[in-house]
């Protein structure tokens, strides 16, 4: 059994079945095939990658413990998220409730079984503990924060990037709010930020020097280095950014409220406005905070905001300002009103950091800060509102109810895959083809399946999904297959077989059946196997 769909994590799953200690592939044909060497490069050479801690961790442990370690790791991650977030939320009464809400947020559910690194939600509350611990001296906080950001970057480039942005926004917010209350500019915080950035930069460059050297100084020494896309298309910063309504729309796959979201999204799309048609459930569902938290925070703010002391006000307004600014960074580069383009901070991120397109993932910071603000508000209401005696009397029950309702709002079902038996086409391919035979799969969205069953068929897949070099692009190659030129390209590249899934467009299936360049060998329940005619 496998938790999640066979998607972005497929390299880890395959590596667990075809590797040996340490950093080696067991099959000579597989290990000598350039696309496989490129795809498994991170597992074979973890310290030459941009996330060496992650690649080393999975390369060794998936080899040692096999495929079952993947499911175990997901549960260990969940426990880590709960434990570390509790270390932050325990400052509030019944902090475990907030820890559970955070750990089972919509963001966590969209990452389970898809992105093993992005499941590491503990990174953010632990960093918040460092930022908010007053016992650290300025120098110690700078060094510790910089070290933490550097280590996070070696685990996840995205999360390291987010922490760099978060640090700047948080300290700016703290300076701004402190000035509003005391009329003094706290330059100490600016110094801490500069020290943090300097420490992080030095450590990141030193740790990633092998990667930098391989890809930017002596690039070309590898037989066929995978092309590097350090810039993303401008359009991606619209598609993978956030929108204000994503914060209040429950996940579209939520069993209770999903249909409501689906209807709202459809009505928005029908307006024709260009920012209404980019809802991408696999990313944007994770921006949902929980309407119970939002509405509860608004009501509690009205009740208790005036009761905050100066220090408490600085803390909560700093978090609120940080939340707002982080969300502005998540916005698309611009939006329009009556035809006029209004640019957002998201445009600045595109210009400065074009390699990080999925800014919607900063939603985990927005969720964390929202829960923290809610916890401060409900704690203050509990402490300072004697006229609301029912809150104290039923505090535990109220919090438990909030937790249950929020978990119901944010839940997204996780797919469980049974992987005990390979599809017949791959068993047949192994039994009836030469060991070094090359094959392609059509359409491209089935390529992950073909790659996942590599340990079964042990054949050479021409078009792994997302694989591209300077001379070859799987996506373009696969799109061209239902054409005479595409079939010629398949032959020229040495392809012996073509697997066509019956889920492909009917016209494309008919095309393959009608062409003399390929001959139907056999048919299975969901696939057709063609042999390329030389």
Image (cartoon, rainbow, N blue to C red):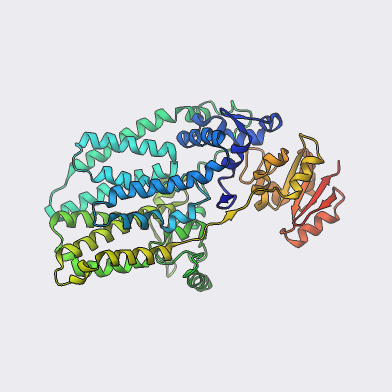
**Number of on-image labels:** 0
Judging depth in this view, the residue of 528 and 532 nearest the camera is 528
Q: Going by the image, does 469 lie left or right of 52?
A: right
Q: Going by the image, does 286 lie left or right of 28?
A: left
- Residue found at x 33% / y 34%: 147
Residue 121 horizontal/vertical position (percent): 40, 48
Q: Going by the image, does 441 lie left or right of 46?
A: right
Residue 447 horizontal/vertical position (percent): 67, 48
Is residue 199 positioned above or below 243 on the image? above
**Quarter of the figure with residue 137:** top left
Residue 362 horizontal/vertical position (percent): 40, 52
Is residue 274 positioned above or below 327 on the image? below
Is residue 147 positioned above or below 325 on the image? above
- Residue found at x 22% / y 60%: 379
**Residue 327 visible in the picture:** no
**Residue 224 visible in the picture:** yes
């Amino acid at each position: 059994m496998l938790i999640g769909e066979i998607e972005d994590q497929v390299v880890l799953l395959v590596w667990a079945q075809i590797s040996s200690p340490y950093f080696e592939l067991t099959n000579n044909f597989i290990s000598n095939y350039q696309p496989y060497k490129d795809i498994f490069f991170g597992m074979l050479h973890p310290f030459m990658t941009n996330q060496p801690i992650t690649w080393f961790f999975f390369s060794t442990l998936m080899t040692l413990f096999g495929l079952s370690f993947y499911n175990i790791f997901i549960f260990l991650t969940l426990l880590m998220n709960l434990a570390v977030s509790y270390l932050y939320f325990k400052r509030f009464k019944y902090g475990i409730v907030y820890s559970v809400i955070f750990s089972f947020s919509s963001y966590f559910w969209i990452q389970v079984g898809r992105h093993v690194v992005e499941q590491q939600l503990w990174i953010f509350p632990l960093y918040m503990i460092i930022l908010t611990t007053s016992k650290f001296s300025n120098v110690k906080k700078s060094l510790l924060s910089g070290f933490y950001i550097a280590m996070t970057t070696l685990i996840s480039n995205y999360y390291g990037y987010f922490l760099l942005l978060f640090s700047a926004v948080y300290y700016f917010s703290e300076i701004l709010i402190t000035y509003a209350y005391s009329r003094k500019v706290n330059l100490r915080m600016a110094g801490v930020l500069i020290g943090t950035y300097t420490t992080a930069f030095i450590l990141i460059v030193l740790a990633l020097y092998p990667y930098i050297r391989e890809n930017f100084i002596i690039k070309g020494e590898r037989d066929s280095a995978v092309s590097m896309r350090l810039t993303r298309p401008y359009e991606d910063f619209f598609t993978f950014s956030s929108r204000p309504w994503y914060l209040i729309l429950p996940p579209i796959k939520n069993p209770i409220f999903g249909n409501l979201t689906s209807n709202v999204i459809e009505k928005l799309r029908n307006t024709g406005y260009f920012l209404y048609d980019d809802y991408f459930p696999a990313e944007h569902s994770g921006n949902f905070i929980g309407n119970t938290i939002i509405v509860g925070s608004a009501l509690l703010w009205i009740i208790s905001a005036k009761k905050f002391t100066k220090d408490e006000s600085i803390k909560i307004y700093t978090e609120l300002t940080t939340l707002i600014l982080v969300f502005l960074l998540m916005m698309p580069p611009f939006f329009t009103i009556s035809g006029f383009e209004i640019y957002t901070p998201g445009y600045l991120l595109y210009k400065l950091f074009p390699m990080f397109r999925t800014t919607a993932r900063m939603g985990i910071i927005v969720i964390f800060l929202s829960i923290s603000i809610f916890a401060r508000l409900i704690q203050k209401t509990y402490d300072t509102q004697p006229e609301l005696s029912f809150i104290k009397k039923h505090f535990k029950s109220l919090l438990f109810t909030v937790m249950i309702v929020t978990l119901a709002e944010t839940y997204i079902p996780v797919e469980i895959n049974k992987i005990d038996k390979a599809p017949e086409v791959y068993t047949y391919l192994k039994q009836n083809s030469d060991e070094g035979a090359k094959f392609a799969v059509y359409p491209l969205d089935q390529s992950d399946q073909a790659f996942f069953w590599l340990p079964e068929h042990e054949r050479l897949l021409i078009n792994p999904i997302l694989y591209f070099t300077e001379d070859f692009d799987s996506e373009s190659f696969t799109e061209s297959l239902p054409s005479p030129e595409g079939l010629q390209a398949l032959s020229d590249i040495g392809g012996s077989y073509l697997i066509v899934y019956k889920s492909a467009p009917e016209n494309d299936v008919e095309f393959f059946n009608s062409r003399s360049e390929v001959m139907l060998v056999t048919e299975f329940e969901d696939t057709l196997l063609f042999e390329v005619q030389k």
